[in-house]
Amino acid sequence: MAEQVLSRPGRRDPGRARGRSGGPVAAVPDGGPNGRFLRTLRRHLAAHGFLIGAVLCFAMFSWYPMIREIIMSFQQTHRDKITRQPKTTWAGLQNYTRIIHDPTFAQAWKNTVEFSLLALLIGFAVPFVTAIILNELRHARGYLRILVYLPVMLPPASALLLFQYFYDPNYGLFDHLLRIMHLPTSQFVQSSSSALVSVTVASTWMNMGGTTLIYLAALQNIPGELYEAAELDGAGILGRIRHVTIPQTRLILSMMLMLQIVGTMQLFIEPFILTNGGAGPGNSTVSVVNLIYQYAFNLSGSSNYNSASALGVLLMLVLGVFSAGYLWLSRDRD
Amino acid sequence: MSTRTLVSTSALNRRRGRIVYRFTATTVIVGFTLIFIGPLYFLFTDGLKSTHESVQVPPTLYPHAIHPGTYADAWTVGGVGRLLFNTLYYAFGALAFQLVFDVAAAYALSKLRPVFGNAIFGLMLSTLMIPATVLVVPQYITVSDLPIVHMNLVGTPEAIWLPAVANGFSIFLLKRFFDSIPDDLLAAAAIDGAGRMRTLWSVVLPMSRPILGVVSIFAVTAVWKDYLWPLLVEAGYSPTRETLNVGITQAAATSPQNVVIAAAAIAAIPPLIFFLIFQRNIMSGLTTGSLKG
């Protein structure tokens, strides 16, 4: 492997390859095999000079933490009874068994999966249908495209503080609108039955613009003749969607599905802001990342990096599967 | 322009088609305006209400008495001005670090092809599989005591700037773009006596403006939208080092409702202006970034 990499650059080096084939230029003294070696070495060193900044940052802030999370999840830190110094020892699977027996653990996974499913139901289907409709419009398309993307640009805190205000059961706008329409009012984020749905609605409003625009771009790449042909064969609008639109966008649909699963499973800020810290009524909105945060940084004294790491590793495994699926699908395309 | 889509133009020109189209178009335009501009309308007008009016039952649909002073309160008392400065400082610092280090690295990987280049690139891409949120705990511990040098970056802007460099997606986008620049062009520059640095600066970079734009937009919005990481590394200092996202949510717990909304509105103004100016680049960058990425 290393040899292959070693030998290739020399062969492809643009400047020298040119010089050789140029005839007279090749007469420039090469310095013998020793000189060539030094020159190759210098070339590699220079190239690594360009790389070093990024490589160091990756090493410190990505690669090392990745390994460290796994190591920490099998360790335990406690203060020595006499010296009061923190001591780290191996703990086997103790961290894992401890978090699995935490009642919030199951609740957090259930909420996260439920949120993901709900968010997919809304956040996958709605943008796709929206994109199909937008693609048919002959008017105001630019305006509508800007419109759906506006919330994506908002700082999440702005959008969520606004929704928190709307969701207020006393003076909030949403209950006011429901009352005007003579519909039953809701406690939204303050009731365990509606909190997660409320979180999903806010999250979808904030995020669907990006997905919609990506679908729109995919729809515009569908050759018009396919619709022409399907219509000649007698396919109605729904038939054309089923037999042309969906097969033609299948790849991008499945890629977005993977990406959205990865994105929604990382749910953190929406419950954190909407339900003041993320737990929600009866832990109804606590997500896995919220729980990691609680384990690691809870100020009530039970702060435990090792439990947080164990939960992080579990989430990493789940997300890794979907991310790998996304990368595989997107590579298949080229 | 008139490429064939789901519904044919001739179908739309029929009488029934025209009616259906007009109905759908109006519904969509009105509905979308209500759904997407509606909340923004309240974001900007609710901040103009008095504290009393902002918690009145039932809520008013427009401020009955206009109190522009609320915005001033949010700016001075709530310290939104300072938060805005912090966020801009972090965002553009992260952008600068990313442009310098990631462009250099992508150039090396694409054109200089060093030993182990492919392995390094593969490791960088592998970070795309593990989203940053999952790694917050070990990342925080690492930043609070850097290995080997034993420096504590918590509370410094570098705690946001340096991790931003470790962005596999930027490296990927840049490298793929550099790969499309023909080697002959670089060879020509080399024959003219340009070194590696000079070639990067005068040949590669001028050709790469579109991708640099895309990467820059991603870099700035990432910092602007991030919450968990700045909450961990920049919170709780005096004078405040928090970002807008963190600062306004923490102030929200103790401020009157109208001031909270005014602060949220102020925080929303810069990215909205940024979007309206660069909307074409942002929206096309989004699709290059994900469709082909």
Image (spheres, coloured by chain):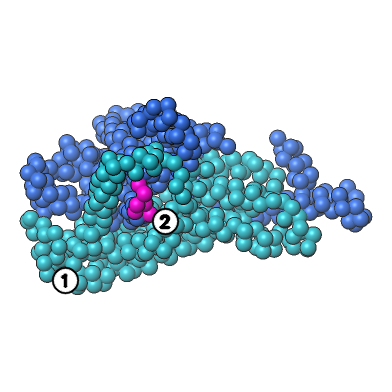
Q: Which segment is the magenta one?
A: A137-142
Say if A220 sits above or below B107 in the image: above
- Chain identifier, cyan in the render: B
Tell me whether circle 2 and circle 1 mark residues in contact (CB < 8 Å): no
Element under disc 2: helix
Q: Which badge, 2 or 1, comes first in the chain's sequence?
A: 1
**x%, y% of residue B33?**
26, 53
3D distance between C-alphas at marks 2 and 1: 31 Å
Q: What residue type is labelled 1?
A: His
The reply to whether the magenta stretch includes residue A141 is yes
In this view, the residue in front, B96 or A71, is: B96
Crowd band around label 1 with a 10 angstrom C-alpha radius: few (<14), some (14–19), many (20+): some
The residue that appears at 27% across and 40% down in the rendered structure is B16
Disc assigned to residue A228: none
Q: Name the residue under label 2.
A: B221
Q: Can residue B178 be seen in this view?
A: yes
